[in-house]
Image (spheres, rainbow, N blue to C red):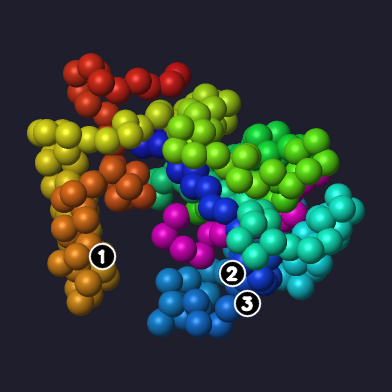
Amino acid sequence: MSGAAFMKLDKLTGPGIWSKAARHNKRTIQAELGASGHIDATRSHLNITLMGPPTPEEVAKLAKAKMTESGIIKERKNGVLGVELVFSLPTDHQLDVIEYFTACAHWAGAAFGGLDNIISVDIHRDEAQDHAHVLLVPLIDGHLRGSDAVGFKRNLSELQAKFYKNVASGFGFSKPRSKLSGHHKAQTARQVLDKMRSDPAAKSAAWAVIRDNIERDPMPYALALGINTHQKDGANFHQYR
């Protein structure tokens, strides 16, 4: 399969963060829907709650109960209360989304203290790419270890490597280069710009900024559009098989 699968990670901090994250995942934020938003509401019926409660209120309540059970009564203002992982598929994939995102969720649970730490998993099929949001409380040895679990840049790189090795590679994906350079970078940028000529973004007021970002770092756009980023000589690109 061409391209690679995405895995993005965010720390959840601040008051009301569980409710905010859950409202997005459950599609109850009206401003995100319809013509003025980035979500195609006519496709939202295709979304799937893979794990956890069906409503944002119940998700937030479950997260709070999980923390209370572990002795966390008072939430620290700047403390990492949770982790959200977003797993995305290329636009041209032919996979069973339930099978793939279930594997992603199980990997996420194992990486952050256990499957019981997962609060919810929601699959979205109403945006440009099929993707899943995994919300979890990073309880490790009975303690909330958000910052420790997420770690710094090196830890994130290691998590990405483990995800590709243990999950994405098994579904036929390849591990992307962290950065493109030289002729390969310019070539990939051209492929992205050519493919985006018919995209609504190309007609927006922000197109000049988007174009500059593509030329500066085309990799995220190439992966989102399912463009193969392999170097043909294979010298600097490792492919999992």
- Which dot marks residue 24? 2
Residue occupying the far right of the picture: 69
Q: Which residue is mark 1?
A: 199
Mark-to-mark CA distance, 2 and 3: 6 Å
Q: Quadrant of the C terminus?
A: top left
* Three-letter amino acid code of the residue under disc 2: His
Query: Residue 17: x, y in percent?
Result: 64, 67
* Three-letter amino acid code of the residue under disc 3: Thr
Point out the tag, 3 or 1, that comes first from the N-terminus.
Answer: 3
Q: How many marks?
A: 3
Residue 198 appears in view: no
Residue at 86% x, 50% y: name it.
Answer: 70
Nearer the camera: disc 2 or disc 1: 2
Relative height, residue 136 to residue 112 (above, below): below
Q: Which residue is mark 3?
A: 28
What residue span does the magenta drawing correspond to?
Answer: 116-129
Front position in the image: 236 or 233: 236
Do labels 2 and 1 touch, CB within 8 Å?
Answer: no
- Count residues near mark 3 (Cα–Cα under 10 Å), then give few for <14, some for 14-19, many for 20+: some
